[in-house]
Structures are given as structure tokens and as C-alpha cells.
Amino acid sequence: MNRILVVDGQEWVTDLISRLLTTSGYEVMTSESGNNALAKLEMFRPDLVLLDLELPDMSGYDVCKRIKQNPDTQYIMVLCTTSLETGEMSMRVAQMGADDYAEKNIDPALLLLKIKSLLRVKNLSDQLKQKFAELEEKNNILEFQMRMGQQVQRSLMPNLDIQFNDMRISSRYMPAMDIGGDFYNLVKVDNECVGVLIGDVSGHGISAALLTAMFNSMVINHAKAYLSPDLLLYQINSEYCRVFESSQNIAYASIFYAVVDTVKRRIYYSNAGGALPLLVRYSTGMVIELDASGMPIGMDDAPVYEYKSVQYSSGDVLFLHTDGLSDTFFKDQPEEFTKRVNEILLSAEGSSPDEIAEAMLAEFYNLNPSPSEKYMLDDVTIIVCGL
């Protein structure tokens, strides 16, 4: 039931209007002065105030202004009544913030029609405010979950700067949003070999982040059982397809996985649709793409992953990245991107993996994207292995 506060300096008028409104199904309270009306606002919380502009203690204009300027009462509808007949009334009513006005001698049926119309607007406004409050609460919950997800994801994938035998490894991870779809890991296979993983799940947000954790877990669980990278990728693909066999909206993942044997100085690798890593041989001044064919994870339930190996020498560098690295400046110029990457790598002879990673970010990554640019960009991950 809608509530209406009737404010008029003449008691017989408030009684008459009160009976009319009560009969029409409204809950009514009356007041004969401006100060009393403002006090009753706090207690009664009406949906509409029927306000006479000629009050004994203060102007109805001032009462209306105080109602509309108070954040707690500004959304209460105000219908002013006056015995004055002037063409300026509508302008004066608008200036003080009232929602409508009516002459005191208005037909009761027309007055009820005005009241009903204003209350319809008030009810719609209340519904919108309620929906907005619910949406804001959901957004706050989502933001909290995103922050927690970001902390968890970063704890699982910290920036690396570690030593494994003669191999120095450095990494950088920059999600486009709070949490992203790139993932990477190092897995100690034995005292001589380490597995290097880098991947990219399609999409952003919480669902992509959950999948990154899933793929990381799969690699950790199976790396020692499936020493050959092609068999490991096949096993991951099989498990992933089984989990989502009934899903119509499956995401895909591009993964490159290599096992680096630091004693034999050999890299064994397979690729499931990931960006091609680069092996820099400073002794010959060459940059070699480690190409190996294979479908992204989740795209085929029986894929074939090519298995390859390559020899390296002391001082060489293995550079891995996700395709987000080229998105900021070279999204449609892959040849130019590869050319510039090769130039940076060849000029970095003697630099540490950490220095090479920083040089790449300085060249290719926009460190201060706007919110709209973040939405359009992809996540960026870099791994540099000094061999």
C-alpha cells in the first residue's frame, strides 16, 4: 500500500483529502505546517507528499526544496497544490524540484489520476533502485572473487628467476584482466631434466583461470609418467575431452611443452597449437623456430602431436611466449614481429634471462592500457631460459 503525506495549513482541507485518499486505498498521514511535515517524513516515509504551497510557518517552496535536497528523501514524489492560477506555476514548481502541481479546486477524480500517475513513476523508480542495489552487490561480490582469484592464480604462477643445474630461467606474466587465461610451469622430471610448460586458454576471466589451474595440475601429475612431450600432450587432451565430452561450449588451450636435458644439452618438445618458441644460437648468430605440429587441446579427441628434439650449446637462449606478446603493436604484422624479436635476441648476447625478458616487455608490451584496451588485449607470458 502506497503512503501519502497530506500537508495543508487548513485542517478541513487535510481531513477532506485524507478521506478521499483513504477511500481510494492509500495509507494517509496529515500535517498542518511545514516543520511538522518535515518531522513526519522521517517517521512516516511516504511515497508521495501532497504539499500546499501556502503554509503558516514556512513556504511550501522551502519544504519542497528540503525534501528534494535531502539524499534520504529526494526520491519521494511531491505534488504541490496552490490556489494561485498563474502560467508561471509550472516553471516555479520545476525550479524547486517538485514532480507536478495541481490547483486546489481541481476535480477529485483528476487529482487521484495525477496521484496514481506519480506513484506509478515512484514504484518504477523504487524497482530500478532495488535492481541497481542488487546489481551493485553482485558486482562487489564478483570483484571480491576476482581479487581472490587473482591472488590464487599469481601464487600458482609467480614470476620466476631460478637456477636448474646450468640453466637459468626467468618469466613474466601479465594478464589482460585481473585474472587471465595464460599459464606456465616448470616441472622437475629428475636431477638432469626439467619440463617447461607454457599455454594459453581461449577467453578471459574466472572460467579461463580455472582451466589454467586444471592444465597446470595435469602436467604436474603426469610429467614423470609421460616423459615424451607428445605423449604428455595426448594424455592431457584425452582427460580434458573426457571431462567436457557433453559440453557444447568447450574452450581450447594452446600448449607448448619441452623437456630440457641439461646433461645431454638437448631439448625434446611437442606443440599443441602454441606460439613457436625460439632457440638462439649465439655461436652461429642464428635464431631457430622450434616448430612442431599439433592441434590445440580440446579440438580433437584423437590428435597426433609431432615429437622433435634439438641440440643446444652452453650460452644459447630458449625464448618462449604466448601470442599476446604481439597483440599490442604487431597483431596484423607477424613477419615484422618475428623480425624484431630476432633482432632483440641476437643483440642480447651475454644478457641474463631477466634482462632479456625486460627488453621484450619494453619493446612489445603496453604497460598502461586503458580499461577498454585491456578488454581487447590478450594475456602476455614470457619465459626465457639461459642454457
Image (cartoon, grey):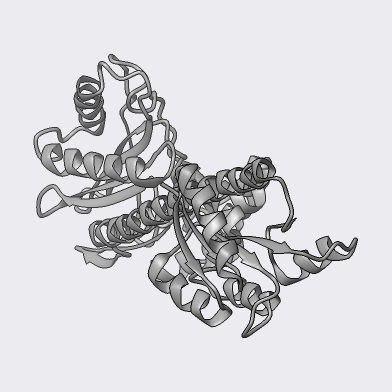
Q: Give the residue displayed 33% in from the left and 48% down from the top.
A: 183
- The mark total stands at 0
Residue drawn at (73%, 50%), measured in percent from left and top? 106
Depth check, front residue: 120 or 219: 120
Instruction: Specify the quadrant of the image occupied by residue 74.
Output: bottom right
On the image, the x and y values in percent for residue 222 come to 13, 37
Residue closest to the far bottom: 57
Report the quarter where the C terminus lies: bottom left
Residue 162 placement, left or right of 143: left
Point 39% across, 51% down: residue: 134
View extreme (right): residue: 87
Q: Relative to 134, is 268 above or below?
A: above
Quick one: 291 or 262, which is closer to the camera? Answer: 291
Q: Nearer the viewer, residue 133 or 276?
A: 133
Residue 338 visible somewhere in the drawing: yes
Q: Residue 326 at what x, y percent from top left?
A: 58, 49
Residue 213: x and y, percent?
24, 45
Judge whether residue 75 can be spotted in this image: no
Side of 79 relative to 274 (left or right) = right
Q: In the displayed structure, would residue 145 be above or below residue 197?
A: below
- Residue at 39%, 50% in the rendered image: 180
Which of the pair 319/238 is nearer the observer? 238
User: Residue 136 placed where, x, y %?
Assistant: 42, 56
Q: In the rendered view, does 217 fall on the left or right side of 275? A: left
